[in-house]
Amino acid sequence: MSKLSSKEIERYSKQLSLPEIGELGQQKLKNSSVLIVGAGGLASPVSYYLAAAGVGKLGIIDADKVELSNLQRQILHRTADLDRLKVESARDSLEALNSNLEISTYQDFLDFELAKKLFREYDLVVDCVDNFATRYLVNDAAVETNTPLIEAGVAAFEGQLMLIDPPQGPCYRCIFPEQSTTDSPERGLLGVIPGTIGTLQATEAIKYLLGLGRLLLGRLLVYDGLELSFREVEIKRNSSCSVCGDK
Ligand SMILES: [Zn+2]
């Protein structure tokens, strides 16, 4: 693994002084790669914190442009970025924060084949999408390629997250087997909610990459912003799951 430069040692000094991370852990982060699916509300804290922490290679896939109604929560983007591609605006923000990283952007809609191809190129995937169709697609591609995935969703004042680590533990479909056919019309969302949940996704990503702590495997963490409370739901792999079940 490549040594850290003196600038990197200064930049990451707060992490280097943690015995759980140290210089070896920081080098591990530098040699790690994370693909972030989406460049919106969840992806903003996820990508900022992973870039700040020194994860060496980040990929971001999103096909959309920045709209005025995004700025209430998607803090990667600024008013001056309106109508720009989100992946380009995201790249500028992340490079301004930390220019030591390799950032790959994909201005594409994710389909199953592309998902499988990209997932094989990264150590870990963080799901930051805002629709169920893509969420199921990302889950299914992660299971098929044995790629660890940090899954999350937010709505109104609430959010939830879980780690999917195939072939062990449950996948998203083990808990929610089928996409609801009566997808409710888009609900509102308090802008800070994806900030909280995305920050937790970034925490879990760093833990996973470094093999630290107790991972969120087999546990769904549910956050209620109005109560300001967290609860945990135990989840098990469903042996008859259509994606990860026993064939
Ligand atoms: Zn499953």
Image (cartoon, helix red, strand yellow):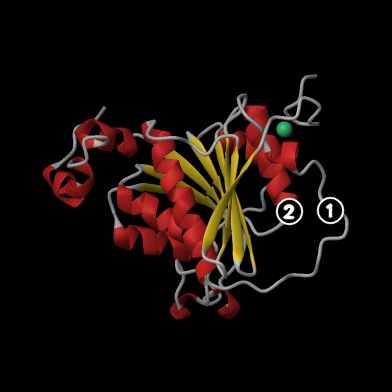
Q: Residues within 10 Å of mark 2 (few under 14, many from 20)?
A: some
- Disc number placed over residue 180 in the picture, else none: 1
Identify the residue shown where x is 15% and y is 44%: 9
Q: Secondary structure at mark 1?
A: loop
Identify the residue shown where x is 28% and y is 34%: 25
**Three-letter code for the amino acid on which mark 2 is drawn:** Phe
Identify the residue shown where x is 55% and y is 63%: 40
Q: Nearer the viewer, residue 175 or 58?
A: 175
Q: Name the image quarter holding residue 141.
A: top right
Q: Nearer the viewer, residue 4 or 202?
A: 202
Say which quadrant the C terminus sits in: top right
Q: Position of residue 136 (x, y in %)?
A: 72, 45
- Taking the image in four quarters, ligand 1 sits in the one at top right
Q: Residue furthest right?
A: 181
Q: Is residue 231 left or right of residue 99?
A: right
- Disc number placed over residue 66 in the picture, else none: none
Q: Is residue 192 left or right of residue 97?
A: right
Q: Residues within 10 Å of mark 1 (few under 14, many from 20)?
A: few
**Three-letter code for the amino acid on which mark 1 is drawn:** Ser
Q: Nearer the viewer, residue 177 or 120?
A: 177
Q: Secondary structure at mark 2?
A: helix
Give the residue at mark 2.
Answer: 132
Residue 85 seen in render: no
Q: Position of residue 143 (x, y in %)?
A: 66, 31
Q: Position of residue 203 (x, y in %)?
A: 41, 47
